[in-house]
């Protein structure tokens, strides 16, 4: 008869072999491995802080509650943490089959929720302000313009841009080969200003260190493959200069959301949108199939009653007096400082 639970100290004894196994056999990206390591470390700290000595079902459920309530993680983030524990638990069972039969991770229910109120997107004017805030008179500025241009122009993830090599770009045919999640490949067509933007970057890429020896498309100022953290930090700095104010937090991924939302506003078919975003099923794409605030506003403006009221305002037949001080002031988040 197997043991009732796995000891905490024993459970975390195979983390390094697990990381090496995933990297070697499944060719998992370095970014995914960092996320896996972070998830496992978070779970370990949770157990040790509460002096939980065995991995039990209640311990895992309490960990879910901790992530959701105390860390205020989204459903997607909580699910990712549990998925990491499941993957590691499977590896642990292979390494120690006799002591790991009671690991509870497979029985933990998935939180069926994604974004709490839909993915947030910037409007067209905000997108313009962001790109106008980029300094294109320097090599680094030209590089960042190309990086964020791909995030918005093609809806690419930061990880997808991080993994781009020179050979992925074909300016003769205006195509870009993108390696997405699960090593899935998709060929993206470069349209609009993207070919010119990328051509400008390639013209200055030779000024970066290691440009002759590195196969990475985007290089850092030290000549390394441009890191995801660097892209995120640069995004925050540019956002601060643009002085864009929103009620939600804006990140690099917001450019991808904006790409999808704006195409949806233009009536692009969901199957086309799914292909562009690199989703495996339409279910992941459906979160973007909703009217934007701009579309809702335009629809409301066409209501007969609203049209009539606007006419009264324009002719001066109706006037409103406002208090000088409002009791309610909506709180805005300065996204440039987050």
Image (tube, helix red, strand yellow):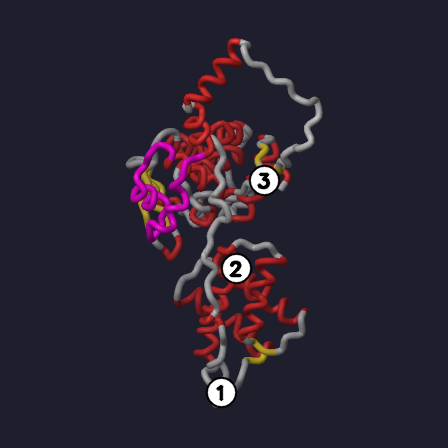
Left/right placement of residue 304 relative to residue 175 reads right
Instruction: Pick the quarter of the image with the C terminus.
Output: top right
Q: Count the marks: how many?
A: 3
Circle 1 is placed at which residue position? Answer: 2
Residue that appears at 62% across and 38% down: 333
Look at the image and say whether residue 267 sits in the magenta stretch: yes
Question: How many angstroms separate mark 3 from mark 2 (CA)?
Answer: 25 Å
Relative to residue 250, is residue 133 depicted above or below? above
Seen as rendered, the residue at the extreme top is 315
- Label 3: how many Cα within 10 Å (few below 14, some 14–19, many 20+): some
Foreground mark, 3 or 1, reads: 1
Circle 2 is placed at which residue position? Answer: 78
| Relative image position of residue 81 (x, y in whole percent) | 52, 62
Left/right placement of residue 334 relative to residue 97 reads right
- Label 2: how many Cα within 10 Å (few below 14, some 14–19, many 20+): many
| Relative image position of residue 308 (x, y in whole percent) | 46, 17
Query: Magenta stretch?
Result: 265-292
Circle 3 is placed at which residue position? Answer: 236
- Identify the element where label 3 is drawn: helix
Relative to residue 102, is residue 272 depicted above or below? above
Question: How many angstroms separate mark 2 from mark 1 (CA)?
Answer: 29 Å
- Label 1: how many Cα within 10 Å (few below 14, some 14–19, many 20+): few
Which circle marks residue 132 in the picture?
A: none
- Identify the element where label 1 is drawn: loop
């Amino acid at each position: 008869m197997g043991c009732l639970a796995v000891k905490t100290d024993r459970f975390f004894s195979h983390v390094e072999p697990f990381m090496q196994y995933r990297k070697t056999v499944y060719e998992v990206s370095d970014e995914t491995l960092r996320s896996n390591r972070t998830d496992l470390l978070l779970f370990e700290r949770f157990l040790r802080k509460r002096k939980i000595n065995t991995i039990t079902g209640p311990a895992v459920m309490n960990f879910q509650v901790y992530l959701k309530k105390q860390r205020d993680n989204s459903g997607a983030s909580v699910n990712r943490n549990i998925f990491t524990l499941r993957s590691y638990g499977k590896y642990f069972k292979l390494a120690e089959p006799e002591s790991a039969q009671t690991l509870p991770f497979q029985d933990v229910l998935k939180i069926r929720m994604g974004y709490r109120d839909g993915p947030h997107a910037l409007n067209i004017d905000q997108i313009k302000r962001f790109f106008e805030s980029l300094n294109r008179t320097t090599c680094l500025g030209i590089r960042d313009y190309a990086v964020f241009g791909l995030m918005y122009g093609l809806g690419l993830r930061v990880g997808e841009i991080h993994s781009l090599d020179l050979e992925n770009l074909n300016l003769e045919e205006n195509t870009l080969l993108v390696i997405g999640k699960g090593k899935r490949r998709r060929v993206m067509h470069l349209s609009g200003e993207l070919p010119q933007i990328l051509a400008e970057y390639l013209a200055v890429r030779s000024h970066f260190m290691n440009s002759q020896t590195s196969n990475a498309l985007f290089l850092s100022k030290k000549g390394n493959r441009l890191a995801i953290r660097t892209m995120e930090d640069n995004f925050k700095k540019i956002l601060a200069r643009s002085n864009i104010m929103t009620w939600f937090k804006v990140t690099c991924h917001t450019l991808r959301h904006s790409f999808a939302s704006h195409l949806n506003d233009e009536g692009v078919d969901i199957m086309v949108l799914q292909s562009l975003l690199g989703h495996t099923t339409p279910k992941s794409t459906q979160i973007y199939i909703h009217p934007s605030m701009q579309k809702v506003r335009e629809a409301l403006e066409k209501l007969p009653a609203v049209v009539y009221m606007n006419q009264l305002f324009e002719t001066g037949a109706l006037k409103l007096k406002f208090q000088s001080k409002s009791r309610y002031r909506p709180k805005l988040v300065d996204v440039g400082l987050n």
